[in-house]
Image (spheres, grey):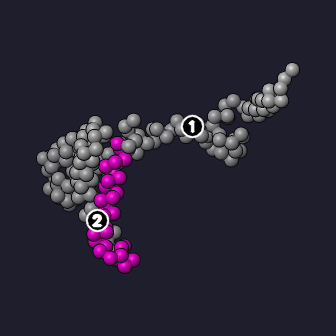
Amino acid sequence: MQSDAERHLANVLQKRTEAAQEVPPEDRKESRSRYRKESAIIGQAQLRKQRGKVEQISAGVVLILSALGTIVAFHGSWAALFTHFSWAALSGGILIQVVLTYLEWHYYDQFYVSWSARGLDTYLTALGFGPLFVPWITEQLTARAVPQSFYSAWAIVAAVSLLIAWWPESRLID
């Protein structure tokens, strides 16, 4: 003779089994709801498969941007990069970026080493890209009556540069 608890458990298991049979097996893991939306053009499983590759590519692009900022900083300005190109500045910028990336990635668990390298990476990226963006940001902030708009513009460039220094490490290291 079954107790009430055993009958209740058997009933719950039977209902769950019936509900699981209503959804085709290929759709069960793709959708958070029981049924796929008819309007959906891509499933959750496909997005999960693509997410890693998208993050790798975006991290690679951001790493190249960081290196470009360092190369420009070594040239002195964007104008100097195009008018007075220097192989020494290019080599120095790439070498410094490789060393900083190595320190950020291989010593990510050692706070002082990784954040010192990230700080220098942030500084060089901001130094390279700042002259491009600071005048426009300053103009926008001044139009909105933000006090100390020049310094605020540099703070914004520094914050974005920090994200540029941090993003590849956060995506490419497990």
**165 shown above or below 77:** above
Residue 60 forms part of the magenta stretch: no
Question: x, y percentage for residue 147?
Answer: 32, 76
Residue 91, image x and y in percent?
16, 44
Query: Which segment did they paint magenta?
Result: 140-169
Looking at this view, is 154 or 136 the one in front? Answer: 154
The residue carrying mark 1 is 46
The amino acid type, in three-letter code, at marker 2 is Trp
- Looking at the picture, how far across and down is residue 9, in whole percent? 78, 29
Compared to residue 100, the image places residue 157 above or below, namely below
Residue at left offset 55%, top offset 40%:
47
Which quadrant would residue 107 be assigned to in this image? top left
Could you tell me which residue is drawn at 59 percent across and 40 percent down?
44
Q: Circle 2: is it few (<14), some (14-19), or many (20+) Cα within 10 Å?
A: many
Figure quadrant of residue 109: top left
Q: Against 41, is 12 above or below?
A: above
Instruction: Name the residue tied to disc 2.
Output: 154
Q: Earlier in the sequence, mark 2 or mark 1?
A: 1
Marks 2 and 1 in Cβ contact (< 8 Å): no
Q: Position of residue 115 (x, y in %)?
A: 27, 47
Tag nearer the camera, 2 or 1:
2
- The kind of secondary structure element at disc 2 is helix
Indicate the quadrant containing the N terminus: top left, top right, bottom left or bottom right.
Answer: top right
Residue at 17 percent of width and 53 percent of height? 74
Q: Can the viewer see residue 135?
A: no
- Is 166 part of what is drawn in magenta? yes
The amino acid at mark 1 is Gln
Left/right placement of residue 29 relative to residue 170 reads right
For label 1, the SS is helix
- Mark 1 surroundings: few (<14), some (14-19) or many (≥20) residues within 10 A: few
Image-based side of 18 in relation to 168, left or right: right
